Amino acid sequence: MTSPCKLDDSRILPYIFHPRATSLTRLPAGAQDLPIEVEPGLIIGCRLYLHSPESPNILYFHGNGEVVSDYDEIGPLYNQVGLNLLVTDYRGYGWSNGTPTVQTMYLDAEILFQELGAWLSDHQYNGPLLIMGRSLGSACAIDLAARHEDKIKGLIIESGFGDTLPLLTVLGVPLDEIDLSEEECFNNTIKIAQVSKPTYILHGARDQLIPVAEAEKLQAWSGARTKEFQIIPGADHNSTIACAGRLYFQAIKQFIDKITGTANWRDRRRKSKDTQ
């Protein structure tokens, strides 16, 4: 893995990361905290919203400015459709310590992937594993999916970006003062082309931070033979769940059921009729 360390320029980093520190919060019913040491004395906070050992598992990298505890109401909604959700923070976010950089974000994501996988195995959570990333988290998710196809069942991207430079421009980075090429950035489009596992991309129709065209680029570059693209009407960058409601979780579960062979076409047709 080659980390795009040039993004760790002091003129760029404040635009990429907006860490929000919080104290350790009370666990929702059925949830469990899993602090993971990524360096001596440096802990990343992870929270597991658990449904059952047989359920599919989603390793989730959240968006910028969010923290694990923001998912205390969302995690149980994943559980309600039969999914385990494993949410991770970044350095300096939530009750994690340290200072975030792009290089350490990638390095930490690799450790979190390995440690969470080990925890699932040790506790006999044997359902298929998928990786999901929202916004900034799409960089971690795509990078891991490209390098660990043998260990995952699929990839889910919400509000993700293809090219980095247009996003940095929207964020206000003074690119005219910085010698930076697209190849020295996150390279999401190049990496997603290496992902052949089933891929599901969701994006808000009114996303002004990361336009729909970026999601379309990810869809076009995706190396997956099985891939789906869902535009959520009325949603902006941060309101996909609010706009889609329970259909958001049902659509993700339906995608997972299809790629894992849990539900055949007759089952899906019957369930569709039942909800009409």
Image: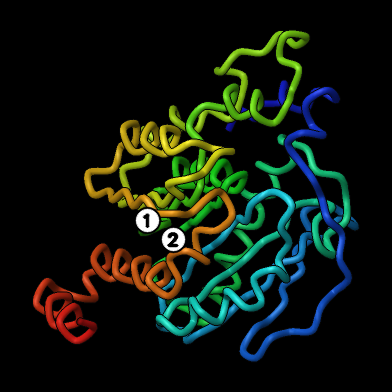
Mark linked to residue 172: none
Asked if residue 79 is positioned above or below residue 234 in the image, the reply reads: below
- Residue 101, by quadrant, is top right
The Cα–Cα distance between marks 1 and 2, rounded to whole angstroms, is 5 Å
User: Does label 1 or label 2 sit earlier along the sequence?
Assistant: 2
Q: Residues within 10 Å of mark 1 (few under 14, many from 20)?
A: many
Residue 70 shown left or right of residue 135 in the figure: right
Q: Position of residue 171 (x, y in %)?
A: 69, 31
Q: Position of residue 10 (x, y in %)?
A: 85, 25
Which residue position is annotated with label 2? 130
- Identify the residue at image location x=67%, y=61%: 88
For mark 1, give the secondary structure: strand
Q: Amino acid at mark 1?
A: Gly
Instruction: Name the residue: 85% across, 74% down.
Output: 24
Q: Are marks 1 and 2 in contact (CB under 8 Å)?
A: yes
Is residue 98 rendered to the left or right of residue 176?
Answer: right
Image side of residue 34 versus residue 235, left or right: right
User: Where 34 sits versus 102, above or below?
Assistant: below
Query: Which colour scheme appears in the figure?
Result: rainbow
Which quadrant of the structure image shows residue 176? top right
Residue 168 x/y as whole percent: 66, 26
Query: In which quarter of the view is residue 59 placed?
Result: bottom right
Who's the residue at 57% across and 46% down the image? 135
Q: Residue tagged by mark 1?
A: 154
Which quarter of the rendering shows the N terminus? top right
Which of these two is toward me, 33 or 173?
173
Residue type beneath disc 2: Leu
Q: How many C-alpha atoms fall within 10 Å of the one at disc 2: few (<14), some, or many (≥20)? A: many
Q: Residue furthest left?
A: 266
Residue 77: x, y in percent?
51, 79
Residue at x-position 72% and y-position 25%: 7
Q: Quadrant of the C terminus?
A: bottom left
